[in-house]
Image (cartoon, rainbow, N blue to C red):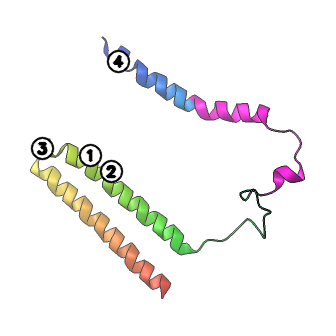
Amino acid sequence: MSLIASYLPLLFVGILSLGFAPLAWLVSRFLRPSQSSKWTEETYECGSVPIGDARVQFRFQYYAYALIFVVFDLVVTFLMIWSVAFAGLSDMATVWMLLFLAIMLLGVTYALKKEEDIWI
């Protein structure tokens, strides 16, 4: 099997994934109702009648929690890759990974400290 032929499944999945979003948008344009009504523009709240405005302002702390989650997610992703390839890595790669973990830990510590200052 040639090198190009081995990448054909990857090319197929790439084309399929790039074409899915425009295709879904195009199909939804043809299937949706053309005229809006009071019922279609009303906010759906589990079958009950909505009370108040649907738009709510969130506090900044929720965004800080989301950023901390992204940092932890990034650290876990790199740790998984590192742990799988750990046996074949050099000592320098281990040093770089520990440096990366130290920087991430410093960032999380800073974010948590900043979070304490916000609550006070």
Reply yes or no: does residue 83 show up in magenta: no
Mark 3 residue crowding within 10 angstroms, few (<14) / some (14–19) / many (20+): few
Distance from disc 3 to disc 1, alpha carbons, whole Å, reads 12 Å
Q: CA distance from mark 2 to mark 1?
A: 6 Å
Q: Amino acid at mark 3?
A: Ala
Position of residue 1 measured from the top left corner of the image (x, y, whole percent): 30, 11
Q: Quadrant of residue 55?
A: bottom right
Residue sitting at x 39%, y 76%? 112
Rendered position, 56 above or below 82: below
Taking the image as shown, residue 117 lies to the left or right of residue 60, namely: left
Q: Which residue is mark 4?
A: 6
Helix, strand or loop at disc 1?
Answer: helix
First in residue order: circle 3 vs circle 1: 1
Q: Which residue is mark 1?
A: 81
Point out the tag, 3 or 4, that comes first from the N-terminus.
4
Residue drawn at (42%, 62%) of the image: 69
Confirm or deny contact between disc 3 and disc 4 (CB under 8 A).
no
Residue visible at 19% across and 43% down in the picture = 85
In front: 49, or 96?
49
Is residue 38 covered in magenta?
A: yes
Q: Nearer the viewer, residue 92 or 52?
A: 52
Asked if the residues shown at circle 2 and circle 1 are in contact, with their CB atoms under 8 angstroms apart, the answer is yes
The span from disc 3 to disc 4 (Cα, nearest Å) is: 28 Å
Residue under numbered circle 3:
87
Dot 1 and dot 4 residues touching (CB under 8 Å): no
- Label 2: element kind: helix
Three-letter amino acid code of the residue under disc 4: Ser
Q: Helix, strand, or loop for circle 3?
A: helix
The residue carrying mark 2 is 77
Amino acid under disc 1: Ile
For mark 2, does the 10 Å Cα neighbourhood hold few (<14), some (14 to 19), or many (20 or more) residues?
few
